[in-house]
Amino acid sequence: MQSPLPPPTPRRSLIRHLPLLLILVAAAIGAVTLGDWLSFETLRDHRAELISFRDQNYPLSVALFMLAYTAIVAFSLPGSAVTTLTGGFLFATWPGVLINITAATLGAVLIFLAARWGLGVRLAARMDNGTGAIKRLKDGIDNNQWPMLFLIRLVPAVPFFVANLVPALVGVPLSRFVISTFLGIIPGGLVFTSVGAGLGEVFERGETPDLGLIFEPHILLPLLGLCALSALPIVIKVLKGRKGIV
């Protein structure tokens, strides 16, 4: 059993919680002030300027877009879906999907680090030193980290912020979080980026993109198949455990 961490001083506790508090404050402010600005209508109205700037400053466009996307994810600002569409619109399905996934992963890592620095280290230590149900929960997560991490990324119903926060609170290593995030968001990222790549035709018809496409059977069923594949190791361990009890 690990030795308990020393109690933090009030000042050190405030410093450790500050990054996560800033993210929560920024998310609250962004939800109120940016909801109408980071929208499909904004992209439609400024598409000519964006394309012109991209054509004249392609490397800078990629860098600025990734910086903006990383900030949107890191601070949990509204408009992540529109931003993913914008990546496809500006940079096509390829390399747009790589740009989108890389930026989203960087933003997710910032949330993960802020949560782990402020809460995760002590919470994970307490769970390790705990007993009963809490200890069993922590052990269950530790024994199935890879499949659990991929599962929460692949299930469309799991909010992205939650999928960034929970691993930090249960002591998931940073390397596992980065790998599972990058690979786990590829299917959904590819779908939305490809939709964004076709926005030119959507704009010409005066329509809006169908963001419910991910729930169409030909898209959702393969995603559910990947979810089942990720959950398979957990199911096998559970069945083996039951056989060992019998």
Image: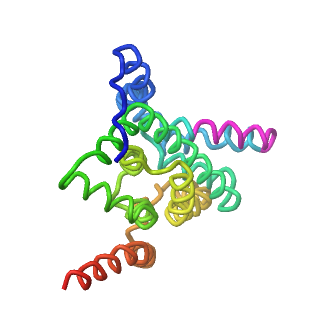
Q: Is residue 213 visible?
A: no
Magenta residues, start to end: 55-69
Residue 174: percent from left, percent from top: 53, 48
Q: Is residue 229 above or below residue 59?
A: below
User: In terms of secondary structure, what is the magenta stretch mainly?
Assistant: helix
| Depth check, front residue: 11 or 58 | 11
Residue 141: percent from left, percent from top: 35, 59
Q: Relative to residue 118, is residue 187 drawn left or right?
A: right
Q: Relative to residue 79, is residue 6 drawn left or right?
A: left
As for residue 66 lying within the magenta part, the answer is yes
Residue found at the far right of this picture: 56
Residue shown at 45%/27% (left/top)?
Answer: 19
As for residue 233 lying within the magenta part, the answer is no
Residue found at the far top of this picture: 11
Q: Is residue 31 visible?
A: yes
Residue shown at 27%/78% (left/top)?
Answer: 241
- State which quarter of the image contains the C terminus: bottom left
| Depth check, front residue: 182 or 145 | 145
Q: Is residue 11 above or below residue 183?
A: above
Q: Quadrant of residue 98?
A: bottom right
Residue 218: percent from left, percent from top: 44, 78
Colour treatment of the image = rainbow
| Depth check, front residue: 68 or 224 | 224
Q: Is residue 73 above or below residue 173?
A: above
Residue 145: percent from left, percent from top: 42, 61
